[in-house]
Image (cartoon, helix red, strand yellow):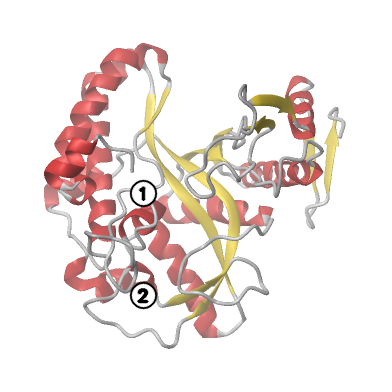
Amino acid sequence: MDLPQIIEDEYSGWVSPKIIDDFTAYADLCFREFGDRVAHWTTVLQPNIIAQGCYDTGSLPPNRCSYPYGTDCTVGNSTTEPYLFVHHSLLAHSSAVRLYREKYQATQKGTIGLNIYTLWFYPFTDSAEDIDAAERANSFLYDYPETMRKVAGSRLPSFSNNESELVINALDFIGLNHYTSVYVSNNADAVEGPLDDFTADMATLFRGNKNDPPTPLLRPGRMVDPQGLEHILGYFQATYGNLSFYIQENGYKGADGNLNDVERIGYLAKYMASTLKAIRNGADVKGYSVWSFMDLYEIWGGYKSHYGLVAVDFNTSGRRRQLRHSARWYSDFLKNNAEIEVDADFGITISHAQL
């Protein structure tokens, strides 16, 4: 998303293969200048979801899309560019990883991976069609399934033999951003065609909550579903083997700037408990990070999204900061080496940390 404007102007950024060499040169600069102080490098942020917002619906910079999937863009192609973006992101990431391993890793002793935005997709009903739709959604968002190759056809870029070798095992860890889960049903009205976009290719309808109306747009809701994170970790283990994970973003969006944010405390406790359950089931989770330390500008929601443990009053000249109840709870949880115990129904007991 965030590129020097000259790169967008000269060759349209991520939809061009030219980005691979420029990104690798940028990574080389970062490794050289900061590598003695960085233990873990994350190359690309959630390319699987940025593809939709930036290059399909065009709701995010660089605002590329085409009718009817996006209506406010002056450039772009919603049927091809989301796939091009992900393709070039993977190649740019893999090129940076090869550079780091060949030139820096032996002396700097760091690790390198990429970040993925994750949702767990539940079938809306027990029908075979909805179960297939949920499996299809999970595979579309986290893999290159045969179904995608079939329906996208020539719109899906292919990897050469050399590119495939570059991409395979090109990470030391996967960073996961995870907030919620989504219900999925089969879209019986979807018709395969050469002008479909990514979500039309998926042939699914989404609901952020059970009672929401269905939509073909992937718009996460606010469902609190800690088991979804456990399912995600299990899915990646089963699909890709024994990988290492960092939960790089997990947090709760408050409806307002309320300091007494007991809902956020419950959310964090449950999702940390889910992470613990996944670890006990064999997931190699190396770290967990709350999103976010303080309220900030969110790409979706601007200053109206209150994710922070620390509240920020953006209406004051000094941007006044105040600790929310969750900040005090989380600090106490960490300082006192608190332990989380969770039962099968996600009933939670926390020792040494006071609510």
Q: In which quarter of the image is the C terminus?
A: top right
Image spot of residue 272 (x, y percent): 68, 41
Q: Residues within 10 Å of mark 2 (few under 14, many from 20)?
A: many
Horizontal and vertical percent position of residue 134: 51, 71
Residues at circles 2 and 1 in contact by the CB criterion of under 8 Å? no
Q: Can residue 17 be seen in this view?
A: no
**Quadrant in which the N terminus appears:** top left
Q: State the residue in front, 124 or 50.
A: 50
Judged from the image, the secondary structure of the residue bearing numbered disc 1 is: helix
Where is residue 169 shown, x and y percent of the image?
31, 42
For this view, does 27 lie left or right of residue 274? left
Residue 40 visible in the shown view: yes
Q: Which of marks 2 and 1 is nearer the N terminus?
A: 1
* Residue at screen point 27% across, 46% down: 90
Q: Name the residue under label 1.
A: 47
Q: Which residue is at a point 21% across and 24% down the rendered structure image?
A: 102
Q: Residue furthest bottom?
A: 189
Q: Name the residue under label 2.
A: 200
258 versus 149 height, above or below: above
Q: In this view, does 113 lie to the left or right of 168?
A: right
Task: Give the residue displayed 34% in from the left and 15% down from the top.
Answer: 34
Q: Disc 2 and disc 1: Cα gap in Å?
A: 18 Å
Residue type highlighted by circle 1:
Pro
Mark 2: amino acid? Ala
